Image (cartoon, grey):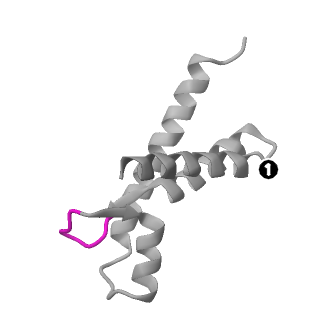
């Protein structure tokens, strides 16, 4: 199970990085990378009150087509959290290691 989550995080990072390469400005690269990474990397509980976690995108598709609606707003919390953390980390990294 640990191998799955490691592989999942690596693939999420790689896809986010590859998509960000299509943009020219540094701001848009950071924004697109953070957005794609937060959408692909976020995990949350499958059902409210459950102890099992799954990627948010799969839960969203499941809620959209199969399961009774538990609310889509609960899925935005991990996405927004990962997005803010990712932007903060990138800005902090650029601040520490910027070229002079």
Which residue sits at x=21%, y=62%? Answer: 51
Q: Which residue has dot 1 on it? A: 22
Residue 85 makes an appearance in the image: yes
Q: Can residue 27 be found in the magenta stretch?
A: no
**Residue in the foreground of this view, choosing between 74 and 65:** 65
Main SS, magenta residues: loop
Q: Quadrant of residue 66?
A: bottom left
Which residue sits at x=45%, y=41%? Answer: 85
Q: Is residue 37 left or right of residue 65?
A: right
Residue 82 in percent (x, y) is at 44, 48
- The extreme top residue here reads 100
Q: Residues within 10 Å of mark 1 (few under 14, many from 20)?
A: few
Looking at the rendered structure, the secondary structure element under dot 1 is loop
Q: Is residue 71 left or right of residue 3?
A: left
- The extreme left residue here reads 49
Q: Quadrant of residue 75?
A: bottom left
User: Which segment did they paint magenta?
Assistant: 45-51
Which residue sits at x=53%, y=40%? Answer: 87
**Residue in the foreground of this view, choosing between 81 and 63:** 63
Residue 34 makes an appearance in the image: no
Quadrant that contains the C terminus: top right
Residue 42 in percent (x, y) is at 43, 56
Which residue sits at x=56%, y=33%? Answer: 90
């Amino acid at each position: 199970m640990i191998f799955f989550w490691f592989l999942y995080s690596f693939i999420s990072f790689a896809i986010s990085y590859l998509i960000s390469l299509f943009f020219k400005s540094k701001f848009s690269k950071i924004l697109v990378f953070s957005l794609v990474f937060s959408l692909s990397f976020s995990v949350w509980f499958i059902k409210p009150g459950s102890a099992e976690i799954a990627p948010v995108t799969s839960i969203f598709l499941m809620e959209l087509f199969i399961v009774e609606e538990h609310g889509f707003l609960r899925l935005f919390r991990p996405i927004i959290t990962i997005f803010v953390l990712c932007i903060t980390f990138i800005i902090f990294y650029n601040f520490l290691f910027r070229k002079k």
